[in-house]
Amino acid sequence: MKNSSLKNSSLKKSLLAALALGASVTLLAGCAGGAGGDDETVKIGVVGASDPYWADYTEAAAEEGITVEVVDFADYNQPNPALTNGDIDINQFQHLVYLADYNVSSGEDLTPVGATAIYPLGLYSTKVTDVADLGKGDTVAVPNDASNLARALLVLQSADLLTLKDGGTIFSTLDDVDTEKSLVTVTALEPSLTATSLPDVDAAIINNDFVEKAGLKFEDALIKDDPSDESALPYVNVFAVRAEDKDNETYAKLVDIFQTTTAVTDGLLEVSGNSAVLATTPPADLQSALATVEKDTAAQK
């Protein structure tokens, strides 16, 4: 999640909206075997299939004998139910915090099988050029999905714009904001709307997926979190599959293709405005981290 879309997310979210598959974007039609045999196609669900590196990815997969169909979804609520229902074979849009919340909330067991990148979450404004210019009572919009809401609040706290009563966790909500000690007022909006809200608020935390779509530049962020910190692991974006497919060799190969194809990784970095940090965290480590976040998430329910 490029604030992945665990997107994102990093990583709890409001889940299980009515499934409405976006138009399927078939970037490559071919003849090689997919997940289970000859003439099968591996369907990968993403949010943002128009990103050019997906065309490079499907071409690289074809060179390895794997036919890939990239299925585009309009928002983050759709790819996990689609994977659960078998409409797609694998998805890549979310971080571990988002995935953990989906699994705990739905009773499912989707599993990470590979990492892609961590996307910093940034604060943008069309009214001020420095975070120091924000004053008492100014309004800041943040994503309302649970995982990115908590992450956004932590970003604002790191810049001394607000204070969280418990010091802040990946589960923080608006109820945890100490309004008397906070400089700004926070309003939560659907993630795609934080960017379009800029004319009406003083600043907004915007997921990477929506920065350039809003005509903004990544380098214009007033502040952002640090994806290189060890505590950022829950916010790494991942490929996810159904649990029974976690050892599927074709899916493992697709992860390797993504991580080692220069055109793909360069394309990902370009789309992120070179803000993303590439990640190759081993699947076992991802699955261990997910188990920890799921345990903590369940304790919050």
Image (cartoon, grey):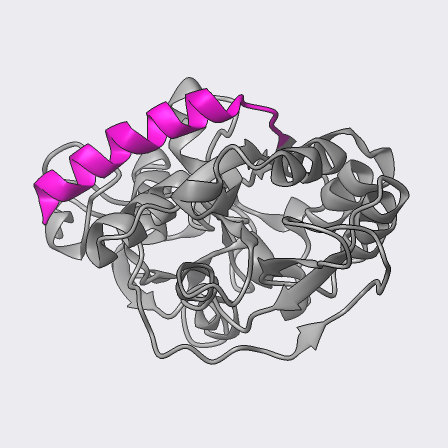
Q: Where is residue 112 in the image (x, y as percent from the top left)?
A: 46, 37
* Residue 169 appears anywhere in the view: no
From what the image shows, is residue 299 above or below residue 53? Answer: above
Q: Which residue is drawn at 28% across and 52% down?
A: 108
What residue is drawn where x is 35% and y is 79%? 18
Q: Is residue 232 left or right of residue 145?
A: right
At horizontal 52% and vertical 54% (from top left) the residue drawn is 5
Is residue 66 among what the camera can see? yes
Magenta stretch secondary structure, dominant? helix
Where residue 278 sits, quadrant-wise, is top right
In the rendered structure, does residue 286 fall within the stretch colored magenta?
yes
Q: Nearer the viewer, residue 48 or 197?
A: 48
User: Would residue 195 be found to the left or right of residue 263 on screen?
Assistant: left
What is the tally of numbered marks visible in this picture? 0
Give how far across and how far down residue 107 sits, in percent: 22, 53
The residue at the point 52 percent across, 35 percent down is 113
Residue 102 image point, x, y percent = 30, 54
In the image, is 144 to the left or to the right of 168? right
Extreme residue toward the front, this view: 38
Frontmost residue, 249 versus 227: 249
The magenta segment: 278-301
Identify whether 273 is placed above or below 295. Answer: below
Is 293 contained in the magenta span?
Answer: yes
What x and y, as percent, mark residue 96?
A: 39, 39
- In this view of the protein, which residue sits in the foreground, 234 or 35? 35
